Image (tube, helix red, strand yellow):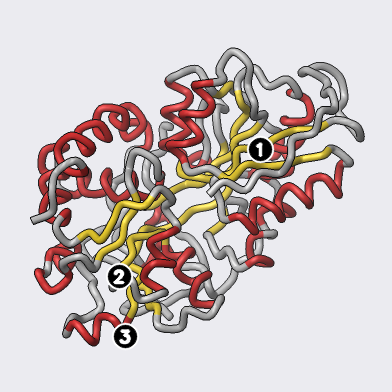
Amino acid sequence: MFTNRKVGVLLSGAATVSLLLSACAGTPSNSSGTGGGGEAGAGDSITVACGAMEDLCQAWTDAFTKKTGIKATYVRLSSGETVARLASAKSNPEFDVWHGGPVDGYGEAVNQGLLEAYSSPEAAAIPDKYKDASGNWTGVYIGALGFCSNKSALDKLGVEVPDSWDDLLDPKLKGQISTAHPSTSGTAFTTLWTQVTRLDGEDAGLDYMKQMHGNVLQYSKSGTAPGQIAGRGEAAVGLVFSHDCVKYQEEGMTDLVVSFPQEGTGYEVGGVGLVAGSKHKSAAQQYIDFAISTEAQNIGQTVGAYQALTHPQANVSDKMVRLDSLTLVDYDFAKASEAKPNLTKRFDDEIAAKPKE
């Protein structure tokens, strides 16, 4: 359930902000693709770097294959892992498409020449605030960063469900907060950049993270893991996108509750983009067209993924958080992308490597 906020129908103008902008692998096919020329069809294959939950990655790729006859397989990777894998294979790409995960990671990939522009005809329906003006990525869903808390664990600690970032600094929560590492997880980088934005500077944002460090149980690799950790009662609070917490609730972790910081929270736009140098460009472009469509965006709800959707004609569930019910920080995705390499290094050096007090 959600606390302090209602769940309801999606989106409003109040949610707009300027947008200038572990592993389950399907076995890649050895079939040859079109290499970027001509029509792709049955016999072609693509490999997707997928940043969503496993079951959604599977559902997306299966539906595309069924629709087109093009074999699509995936490797589930966090955002940091995706950028690293794309960079390491830049001269001989192993992936054709990146699908899912916050677009500040996509921006980092663009800055390294790892994605190339593709303006899908399907993207015309997507509001400008949810797509890159140069066509390097298109947003397919939106997720709000929230607190995924185990109510039973909080009750035992004598702590209320948090509704402020300052609540996470409570000494009673020592070792009771689970969050991912911002170098590997797009979710965790959203947490870090949210602090930088709301506190007006990198030094202030890192100072907050230093204060929270003593309360952190562990920094996981995957951004979705903290919700599961909280659901199992191993920590009292997990920092995740709220739709992930809703999914875990539906899967039986009934002690979980979702809440949001009243002073402002960050959010993700989950994207899809074409990997630079894809050997199967035509098939990859067809996949991107599919990913942006209402048909693909609506798949999420069939596997318990309740992200808000970017296509105006996509289905709306009452399990999606209403972005206009939240206070959102002015999250600048382009600036976040540029700052990410240095900021995550500072987090490593100044916070993660330090002992917890």
Q: Nearer the viewer, residue 345 or 118?
A: 345
Circle on res. 48 = 1
User: Please, what is the three-letter code of the amino acid marked with disc 1?
Assistant: Val
Mark 2 and mark 1 lie on one chain; the one further toward the N terminus is 1
Q: CA distance from mark 2 to mark 3?
A: 11 Å
Up/down of 130 relative to 179, above or below: above
User: Please, what is the three-letter code of the amino acid marked with disc 2?
Assistant: Ala
Where, by quadrant of the figure, is residue 299 drawn?
Answer: bottom right
How far across and how far down the image is residue 333, in percent?
A: 37, 37
92 on left or right of 30:
left
Q: Nearer the viewer, residue 58 or 120?
A: 58
Query: Label 2: which residue?
Result: 235
**Regarding mark 2 in the picture, which secondary structure is present there?**
loop
Mark 2 and mark 3 lie on one chain; the one further toward the N terminus is 3
- Identify the residue at horizontal 33%, vertical 65% (top origin): 238
Q: CA distance from mark 3 to mark 1?
A: 39 Å
- Identify the residue at horizontal 25%, vertical 78% (top origin): 161
- Identify the residue at horizontal 29%, vertical 69% (top origin): 237
**10 Å neighbourhood of mark 3: few (<14), some, or many (≥20)?**
some
Position of the C terminus, as image quadrant, is bottom left
